[in-house]
Amino acid sequence: MSSEQTTTYQIYQPHPQEAATYADFRKHTFVQQLVDANVSRDAAWEHTMYWGSSYLSAVGAWSSALRSGQESSDRYVRGVKGGNQLAGVFIAQHDSKYSYCLGDDYIELVQLIPQYQGQGIGTVLMRTFLDCSDKSAWLHVLEDNVQARKFYKERFGFEEMDNHPIEISDERVNTILMRKTK
């Protein structure tokens, strides 16, 4: 018999005031993912700070839409709270403008802190988003993140489409572009 610990959580639609908290969460968790993929901590911070402005801009656009009283039609954002702390983030873009998935949905971020992983939360977040979409969905995952690649393939039927290297300072990390067809 397993002695797994179940943690209590709540999935919610965040408030605009939480945009900076989301950006901070992303910075800290992504740096650790890059370090786990054998990127030096300094290079990981540099890369995350560079892309952080783009990420903050996306969160800001979503935040503005919420302030106007409606959820942005092109962004889908959910938070996961465990107690009083942010435990996870899910951000996707409807009708993507990226050339490789133009007009389809692009899942920008599915991230949970370790103590909330393996409890079905990521599955609920993904399923909720995928069930409300009538388009194909795309995402990138670090090549070294075998657990995430397996999760997307086995639970949702994503296929690996292409290898996308990322240059980080003088270091290189490979990401895998994945697609789920509707």
Image (tube, helix red, strand yellow):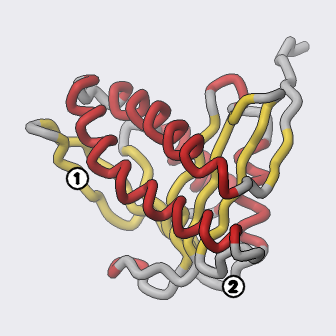
The outermost residue toward the left is 170
Q: Which element carries disc 2, helix, strand or loop?
A: loop
Taking the spot 31% from the left edge, 42% from the top edge, the residue there is 49
Q: Is residue 142 visible?
A: yes
Taking the spot 43% from the left edge, 56% from the top edge, the residue there is 55
Picture quadrant of residue 46: top left
Three-letter code, disc 1: Pro
In the image, 180 versus 168, the foreground residue is 168
Q: Which element carries disc 1, helix, strand or loop?
A: strand
Picture quadrant of residue 72: bottom right
Tell me the quadrant of the picture where the C terminus can be found: bottom right
Residue picked out by circle 2? 134
Three-letter code, disc 2: Asp
Is residue 62 placed above or below 43 in the rendered structure?
below
Tell me the quadrant of the picture where the N terminus can be found: top right
The dot on residue 57 is none
Residue picked out by circle 1? 165
Distance between the alpha carbons at the discs numbered 2 and 1: 29 Å
Mark 2 crowd level (few <14, some 14–19, many ≥20, 10 Å Cα): few
Mark 1 crowd level (few <14, some 14–19, many ≥20, 10 Å Cα): few
Picture quadrant of residue 170: top left
For this view, does 122 lie left or right of residue 75?
A: right
For this view, does 122 lie left or right of residue 105?
A: right
Taking the spot 72% from the left edge, 67% from the top edge, the residue there is 129
- Horizontal and vertical percent for residue 153? 58, 55
- Horizontal and vertical percent for residue 97? 41, 81
Residues tagged 2 and 1 counted as in contact (Cβ below 8 A): no
For this view, does 52 lie left or right of residue 107?
A: left
Is residue 18 placed above or below 5 in the rendered structure?
below
Q: Is residue 181 visible?
A: no
Q: Earlier in the sequence, mark 2 or mark 1?
A: 2
- Horizontal and vertical percent for residue 168? 19, 42
